[in-house]
Image: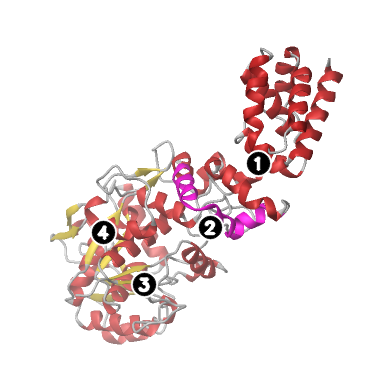
Amino acid sequence: MKTRVRFAPSPTGALHIGGVRTALFSYLYAKKNNGVFILRIEDTDQSRYVKGSEEYIHQALDWSGLTPDEGPSVGGDFGPYRQSERKEIYKQHIDLLIKKGKAYYAFDKAERLIEARKIEEDNGKTFRYGAENRMSFENSLTLSNDVVNEKLQGDYVVRLKIDSGNEISVFDQIRGNILLDSSLLDDKILIKSDGMPTYHFANVVDDKLMEISCVIRGEEWLPSLPIHKLIYDAFEWDTPKFMHLPLILKPSGKGKLSKRDGDKDGFPVFPISWGKSSVGFRESGFLTEGFINYLALLGWNSGTEQEVFSFEELKQNFSVEGVQKGGARFDFEKAKWINHKHIDRLSPEELISLPMVKDKLKRVDSSKHLALIQLLKERLFTINDLQAEISWVSERHPYDEKVMRKLKSKSPDIILEGVSKILNECNELKKLKDLLMPWAKENEINIGLMMQCFRFALVGKLTGPDLFGVCNILGKNVSLDRIMYAISYFKQKN
């Protein structure tokens, strides 16, 4: 059987990185097995539909490099790929289950169900509409055909008829065999009163008709697995393989990662921005490969010491055996480190060609771009780091007052006067270091102190990229101007 997997998000808002991770593992599984990756939009719950969500899903997958082989935007032989466009298909299949005696119409008013639930709860029991009590309710099992036909003109739902006392057994590729007593389940609603299918029913019907060979989804759907097995059995269909991925946990390791965690601690939880308030990984300066590499490590291990993978390496190395059962703790610092490694893999020319890098460098003379990226590349954990790293290029950076107070007692103006004299006489900046070192030694000036004073004059602080690289970017004249300004500044402070 050909490998066919699907990613089936609901258009109810921004796509959380947990959803992107599901899409990624589905994509990698398909590509590792020469299969097909499908996008299906599960929009049966129209009350939760959020305008713009479907477009966002497409944009997020596109930026993440997870291009569907089939889906709403690219078509395919198994469409439609939006569940809201498949209503007639669900109608045909629910009619089939009703004819087989595996499902039935239910006409109970909300008030009656609330009353029945209260009675059970008052007696310390859990209310289930199922084998033990279904014959006491208004449904097609208890009413005459004439009454049923009359009531079908009004509101009704369709429920799955679940026999009591059977052991449900279904195998998950990650978690092994899962067992459940059918007596613990109620007769699940398959068709809602608005005529739309529930998640359970549409999911099974679509996976069957789209010939999905392996269902890959989050751990939160694990409780639905026995229900889906019963629906497959009701149709007398073979079940696909199942793979339920571990949760992505909060940085503390306690509980599922949420948007609130990102808002509180200042990190993104969406691939790309959603509206004006929720910044994505893309807007936070992540490369697609850095983002995808980190997501792959949230719940998967290659079995080796390797942590940095190109997209092609992920396709080659991904395996079901490497997917873990336990939750994966989100670590934004680790995500930035992975992204840093991918930035470092790119040549300066490749980095400069990226639109987000071009945007950051637009205020810098283009003739300096290559040398600047060569100087800064190893310091970048995100592309956004460029903003702070290049702040000294176009204009003199404000001085760090704490550093000024630390240096002013060590005669920085005298040291800088010596540095400016040597720089002024230096015809080739690449030789400046070789001129400064012996001068400092000859004048018994601590080399570390000299470098601190020189750096402070050029960039206003004591940290940054290679000092002589900075001087080369600024050029001789700008460097001299900044040194002379610093000399004047220190003399005023004294």
Q: Which residues are magenta?
A: 337-362
Our reading of the magenta stretch's main secondary structure is helix
Asked which secondary structure carries label 1, the reply is helix
Q: Position of residue 83 (x, y in %)?
A: 41, 76
Q: Are marks 3 and 2 in contact (CB under 8 Å)?
A: no
Q: Nearer the viewer, mark 3 or mark 1?
A: 1
Residue name at image x 44 percent, y 55 percent: 289
Q: Name the amino acid, label 3.
A: Ile
Residue of label 3: 38
Q: What amino acid type should be assigned to the residue bearing mark 2?
A: Glu
On residue 350, which mark appears? Answer: 2
Q: For the residue labelled by badge 3, is the local secondary structure a helix, a strand or a loop? A: strand
Of labels 3 and 2, earlier in sequence is: 3
Q: What kind of residue is marked 1?
A: Ala
Q: Quick one: quadrant of the N terminus? A: bottom left
The residue that disc 1 covers is 388
| Label 2 vs 1, first from the N-terminus | 2
The residue indicated by pointer 4 is 243
Q: CA distance from mark 3 to mark 2?
A: 31 Å
